[in-house]
Amino acid sequence: MNRRSLLAGAAAASGAALLAPLGRLVGAEIAPSRRRMLQVNGYAVDAETPLDLLTSYLTPNDLFFVRHHWVPQLPDKAAWKLTIDGEVSRPLELTLADLKKMPKASVTSVLQCAGNGRGLFKPYIAGVQWNYGAVGNARWTGARVKDVLAKAGLKGGAKHLHTFGSDKPPEKVPPFHRSLELEKVLEDGVIAYEMNGEPLPDLHGAPARLIVPGWAGDHWMKWLVRLGPQPEAQKGFYMDVAYRFPKKPGEPGVAFKPDEMTPVTELPVKSSITTYPERTKAGAPAV
């Protein structure tokens, strides 16, 4: 089966699954005694989902992996505003109520940390030592990026969307500022304020975060406070050094220069076996 056939089959399956009750889709049958997370970092606190709990179509909010670069500074939801500036003719400041007045869009999409599985690599690679569980699937609901930028009067010269969150790094640590290709985010990007039918949790970016279906989690900016279309990509540590991979494969452990690497964008197909039947045989239904 090729990639296109696999993704087409997955899309058909997801469409059928969306007709099922949401409670069953998000693992409501998982007993409280089994609900737990695996902490993989002390500062900031990062935690992954145990593999045996990644068994429902949608990952429950309380079991969804948590990734921070440092201790987050959560926005005041009552005072929160999203600034739209840069290459636009009508700069905006939108409240959460403003976003909710715009046409609503929902997308069911997998969110995966770009470093998921890093702890399994040999030789050792610096960074959060994730095993299998820095991944989850959720139904995200909010306003389309396309609609928000249209409201602000997006100019034709913009090629990249600069993204900013409210969290501030410790002293002398570079800020987590990012950008991504405008073409991609105009296609299917969402500014989400709901996750699996509930208000977006604080740990997952409340009151609003960016959703970039099919792309690695470093593009999914949490605690979103500003979007700025620009002609050029953002500069900085988290664009020019971090979240990049080699343009050409090399030997394990070999260091690459920044210009020999390219930003992580699309996620390749990756599968995890999280449950299995008690007994089965080839050609017969699993039981």
Image (cartoon, rainbow, N blue to C red):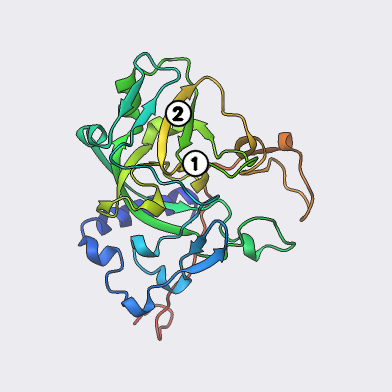
In the image, residue 40 above or below residue 223: below
* Three-letter amino acid code at the position of disc 1: His
Give the residue pinned by disc 1: 219
Lower position in the chain sequence, tag 2 or tag 1: 2
Residue 248 position in % (x across, y down): 72, 43
Residue 58 in view of the camera: no
In the image, residue 280 above or below residue 4: below
Q: Quadrant of residue 260?
A: top right
- Give the CA separation, mark 2 to mark 1: 14 Å
Q: Is residue 181 left or right of residue 58?
A: right
Circle 1: element type = helix
| Residue appearing at x 46%, y 66% in the figure | 49
Q: Quadrant of residue 79?
A: top left
Q: Is residue 172 left or right of residue 277?
A: right
Check if mark 2's residue and mark 1's residue have beta carbons within 8 Å.
no
Q: Looking at this view, is 7 or 160 the one in front?
A: 160
In the image, residue 222 above or below residue 38: above
Residue 135 position in % (x across, y down): 47, 58
Residue 97 in view of the camera: yes
* Three-letter amino acid code at the position of disc 2: Glu
Give the residue pinned by disc 2: 183
Residue 144 position in % (x across, y down): 31, 34
Q: Quadrant of the C terminus?
A: bottom left
